[in-house]
Amino acid sequence: MPKQDIPSYFFADAYKHFEMNYPKFHKMDNLSKLGLIATDAAIKGNDFLQRNKPEATAVVMVNKASSLDTDRIHQQSINDKNNYLPSPATFVYTLPNIVIGEIAIKHKLTGENLFLVCNEFDAQLLIDQAQITFSQETRAAICGWVDYDNGNADALIYLVEIADDSIKNTNFIPLNATTLNQLYK
């Protein structure tokens, strides 16, 4: 999804389109909603989650704005001295790694996870960090860039797994920075 202003109905329509069936979705911040939608779009129509064990599947995400969009909302609730009522429901989303937690909870993933913040999309950083998570235990990863700030959404989620002879799928693309940059653009 290229960076763009998204209409207010986007999240609700995407939730219905992907038949997400995750009631907590409607209470989440926009970064987490975007991450879940992009992840569901990536895994829909394939057997990635069935083929890979939950404990052997990592989640690696990066963005630029961290959780700044939600941080502003939380700060406004603190600044209003006449109506001082910071919400724990908002506060919990003031960490960007919560999007990974929501993805892991929804898809019952218990593998490694990592959320980084950097100035711009960096394909090589994503590749390197995903490779670091791979080990004897970790054989697959949901990776990507998920950024949401001031109504601007920017996301690319892709699935990575260690190729072996048991996988007979011709849709696989070798992962390298050039290919990942082309997918992002």
Image: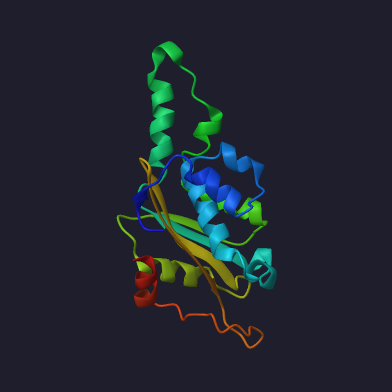
Residue at 51%, 45% in the rendered image: 11
Counting every numbered tag in the picture gives: 0
Q: Residue at x 46, y 58 (%)?
A: 61
Q: How is the image coloured?
A: rainbow
Q: Position of residue 138 (x, y in %)?
A: 60, 70
Q: In front: 138, or 80?
A: 80
Tell me which corner region of the image, top left, top right, bottom left or bottom right, holds residue 156: bottom left
Q: Residue at x 62, y 68 (%)?
A: 45
Q: In the displayed structure, would residue 79 be above or below residue 162?
A: above
The quarter of the rendered structure image containing the C terminus is bottom left
Left or right: residue 81 versus residue 93 is left
Q: Position of residue 67 (x, y in %)?
A: 42, 43
Q: Along the line of sight, which residue is nearer the eye, 143 or 26? A: 26
Residue depicted at x 42% and y 22%: 78
x then y, percent, for residue 85? 49, 19
Q: Do we see residue 124 in this rendering?
A: no
In the image, is 54 to the left or to the right of 153? right
* Residue 84 seen in render: yes
Q: Nearer the viewer, residue 177 or 157?
A: 157
For residue 179, above or below residue 9? below
Horizontal and vertical percent for residue 34?
A: 49, 50
Which quadrant holds residue 164?
A: bottom right
> Can you say which quadrant of the picture contains the N terminus?
bottom left
